[in-house]
Image: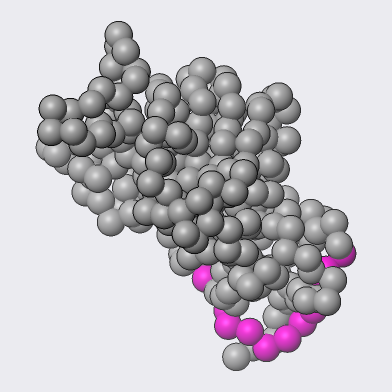
Amino acid sequence: MAQRQMIEIDEGKCNGCGECIPNCPEGALQIIDGKARLISDLFCDGLGACIGHCPQGAIATLTREAQGYDEKRVMENIVKQGQNVIKAHLEHLKNHGQEGYLKQALDFLKKCPSATDKALGCPSVESASGGCPGSKMMDFRAKDNDVPQRRTNHQSASALKQWPVQIMLVPAHAPFFENAEVLIAADCVPFAYADFHEDLLKGKVLLVGCPKLDELNVYGAKFSEILEQHAIKSITYAHMEVPCCFGMINVIKSAIAASGKKVPFEEVTISIKGERLR
């Protein structure tokens, strides 16, 4: 391996706030075990876009042996995050004079016009199926009454009124976001909390994701896009009591702050025994 410039994280200074995550569009950073971690040399360009966003001064650059930066791999990751992140990445490369990487990125986009769908493993948007079935946008909110009705077999009806729900699949431009109350739920919550539909979901647009296993910078970019394109009435984040679920809080708050909009934010915590703690 050759020597090149990379970022270095001082674990003693890092408090796991997550401020650096949305500012690394390449996806090289994640919060793991309460600390920001560099997950792959291949994704880190060493230019340090994240450094100025660390309030603890825990990130610096150094020269060390590392795998070569792979722009193709980075672009495969970035296209999942939407047009705003793609634009930010291209501007980042241009501002740092990385003409070679910039050309590789642009070539990737030219060769893959439906890059977002392909990166997610879905058919081309030009296909007869109209795109990936799993991410086909549907709004089935009742026009006259948004309150779930009881079924005749005594089972509660679902309060879910839109599709898809996974953060990675929901399009930021979806019309159901306009003037909506949004519920962002860590994906263990609906399994643990028996009253999830009645107490938390009713009347809200749902976004679901895992703050431990998924890439929080991707989520941050999606939240920013949604807030930029829509008037959001409120955002509620429901998560489990376990530490790994708390990483999404700062990502959501940062997206709201960056939007410049006054969006009420509420946090709901569910115990592993299925009790609502707050």
Considering every residue shown, the one lying at the far front of the view is 154
Q: Position of residue 20 (x, y in %)?
A: 71, 57
Between 170 and 107, the residue placed more toward the observer is 170
Magenta residues, start to end: 57-70
Between 85 and 277, the residue placed more toward the observer is 277
> Quarter of the image holding residue 254?
top right
- In this image, 91 relative to 48: left or right? left
Q: Position of residue 9 (x, y in %)?
A: 76, 74
Q: Position of residue 47 (x, y in %)?
A: 73, 64
- Residue at (79, 68) in percent of width and height: 14
- Residue at (25, 34) in percent of width and height: 156
- In this image, 70 relative to 63: left or right? left
Considering every residue shown, the one lying at the far top of the view is 144
Between 275 and 258, the residue placed more toward the observer is 275
Colour scheme of the rendered structure: one colour
Q: Position of residue 149 (x, y in %)?
A: 25, 23
For the question of whether residue 74 can be seen, the reply is no
- Residue at (42, 49) in percent of width and height: 193
Q: Is residue 152 above or below residue 207?
A: above
Is residue 67 shown in magenta?
Answer: yes
For the question of whether residue 150 can be seen, the reply is yes
